[in-house]
Image: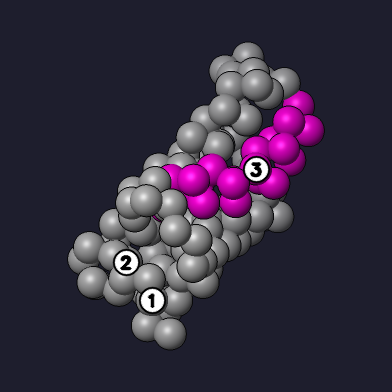
């Protein structure tokens, strides 16, 4: 239970960072998009906290779950209008990549900093 709480709070922190990065990118961003980003990253934390998959090492576990649980957010980004600053494909790629990084950071916080092993 402690692992779930620590990982979920870690996901919420990563969600806050993600919302801050989106908000600082310039232009108006609709509130539902910000909420979607926040809850997508929080869901990564919940998944890491609940997961019992053995993937060899905690780094791999966090990174892969981060990638997988970022896919819904990344696919919704494909529906965004084109921007001169970035393409829909690059938005998809970086959303999934950042999901993997957030998954790694959540797992690092949970497994190493708080010593909450599976």
Q: Looking at the picture, how far across and down is residue 99, in whole percent?
A: 50, 44
Mark 1 and mark 2 lie on one chain; the one further toward the N terminus is 1
Q: Is residue 80 magenta?
A: yes
Magenta highlight on residue 21 = no
The boundaries of the magenta stretch are 62-81
Q: Position of residue 59 (x, y in %)?
A: 34, 49
SS for callout 3 = helix
User: In the picture shown, does residue 4 fall above or below 29?
Assistant: below
- Farthest residue toward the top? 84
For the stretch drawn in magenta, the main secondary structure is: helix
Q: Nearer the viewer, residue 85 or 76?
A: 76
Please give the name of the residue rendered at 50% of the width and 61% of the height, measured from the top-left corner: 53
What quarter of the picture does the C terminus occupy? bottom left
Which sits in the foreground, 42 or 63? 63
Using the image, tell me which numbered label, if any, was put on residue 3: 1
Q: Of the numbered discs in the image, which one, if any, rests on residue 98?
A: none
Q: Disc 3 designates what residue?
A: 71
Q: CA distance from mark 1 to mark 2?
A: 7 Å
* Residues under numbered marks 3 and 1 in contact, where contact means CB atoms less than 8 Å apart: no
Q: Nearer the viewer, mark 3 or mark 1?
A: 1
Q: Residues within 10 Å of mark 1 (few under 14, many from 20)?
A: many
Which residue, given by chain and number where applicable, does mark 2 sit on? 110
Callout 1 touching callout 2 (CB < 8 Å)? yes
Q: What percent of the width, then of the height, locates residue 102?
A: 42, 49
The answer for how far apart the CA atoms under marks 3 and 1 are is 24 Å
Badge 3: residue crowd in 10 Å (few <14, some 14–19, many ≥20): some
The residue lying at 62 percent from left, 30 percent from top is: 92
Q: Is residue 7 visible in this depiction of the protein?
A: yes
Which residue is outermost to the bottom?
1
Q: Position of residue 83 (x, y in %)?
A: 66, 20
Labels 2 and 3: the sequence-earlier one: 3
């Amino acid at each position: 239970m402690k692992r779930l709480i620590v990982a979920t709070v870690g996901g919420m922190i990563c969600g806050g960072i993600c919302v801050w990065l989106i908000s600082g990118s310039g232009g108006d961003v609709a509130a539902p998009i910000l909420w979607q980003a926040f809850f997508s990253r929080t869901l990564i934390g919940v998944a890491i906290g609940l997961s019992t998959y053995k993937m060899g090492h905690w780094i791999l576990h966090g990174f892969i779950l981060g990638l997988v649980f970022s896919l819904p957010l990344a696919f919704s980004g494909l529906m965004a209008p084109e921007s001169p600053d970035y393409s829909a494909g690059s938005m998809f790629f970086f959303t999934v990549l950042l999901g993997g990084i957030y998954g790694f950071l959540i797992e690092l916080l949970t497994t190493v900093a708080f010593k909450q092993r599976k």
